[in-house]
Image (cartoon, helix red, strand yellow):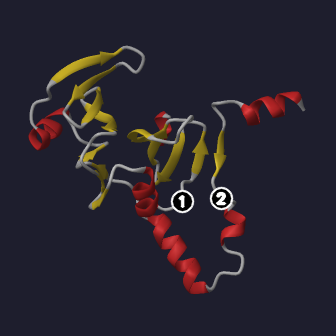
């Protein structure tokens, strides 16, 4: 029992935002079809960067970075731009971090303001809520909106493959 309480209260625990079994209760067939179609799309790009882009693709679309830095923990090279950082490992983009001061967040072709409210309005309810933010997952791609746990203000947004989380 103590172990269960420890796991549930751990800062690393992630809690589902909604019980999937409850979502369909009292819903019409049309509402269920809409919910299922909304969940079917995937996150392909964030700020026009795909997790399948190569280093050459990134430079062709966003130009030369301001600088490069190594992330020893992840073993990636980080390409630093004015409004984002892009991690590349083995020549392929593995994550994108959009700064809180960026002019916008673009998911696929949808633009939104860099505020927790605007992001939630555009992406819907998060799939998981963690102590440090909200997580949206579609087709093995995740977007995490990092929030300051003390005041709820946006820290940054990350796009990554949920297999690497």
Among the 4 quarters of the image, the one containing residue 154: top left
> Height in image: 69 above or below 66?
above
Image coordinates of residue 55 in percent, x first then y, are 18, 33
Residue at 50% x, 77% y: name it: 34
Sequence-wise first label, 1 or 2: 2
| Picture disc at residue 125 | 1
Among the 4 quarters of the image, the one containing residue 132: top right
Q: Characterize the local packing of mark 1: few (<14), some (14-19) or many (20 or more) Cα atoms within 10 angstroms.
A: some
Mark 2, residue position: 18
Contact, mark 1 vs mark 2 (Cβ under 8 Å): yes
> Height in image: 26 above or below 45?
below
Q: How many marks?
A: 2
Tell me the quarter of the image containing the N terminus.
top right
Image coordinates of residue 147 in percent, x first then y, are 49, 39
Q: Characterize the local packing of mark 2: few (<14), some (14-19) or many (20 or more) Cα atoms within 10 angstroms.
A: few
Q: Nearer the viewer, residue 159 or 149?
A: 149
Image coordinates of residue 102 in percent, x first then y, are 26, 43
């Amino acid at each position: 029992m103590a172990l269960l309480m420890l796991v549930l209260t751990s800062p690393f625990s992630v809690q589902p935002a909604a019980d999937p079994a409850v979502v369909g209760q009292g819903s019409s067939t049309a509402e269920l079809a809409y919910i299922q179609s909304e969940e079917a799309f995937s996150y392909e790009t964030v700020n026009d960067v795909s997790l399948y882009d190569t280093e050459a693709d990134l430079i062709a679309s966003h130009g030369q970075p301001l600088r490069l830095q190594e992330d020893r923990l992840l073993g990636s090279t980080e390409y630093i731009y004015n409004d984002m950082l892009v991690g590349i490992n083995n020549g392929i983009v593995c994550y994108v971090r959009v700064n809180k001061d960026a002019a916008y967040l673009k998911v696929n072709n949808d633009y939104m303001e860099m505020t927790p409210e605007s992001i939630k309005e555009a992406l819907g309810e998060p799939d998981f809520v963690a102590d440090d933010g909200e997580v949206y997952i579609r087709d093995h791609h995740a977007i995490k909106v990092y929030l300051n746990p003390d005041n709820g203000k946006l820290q940054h947004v990350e796009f990554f493959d949920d297999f690497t989380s």
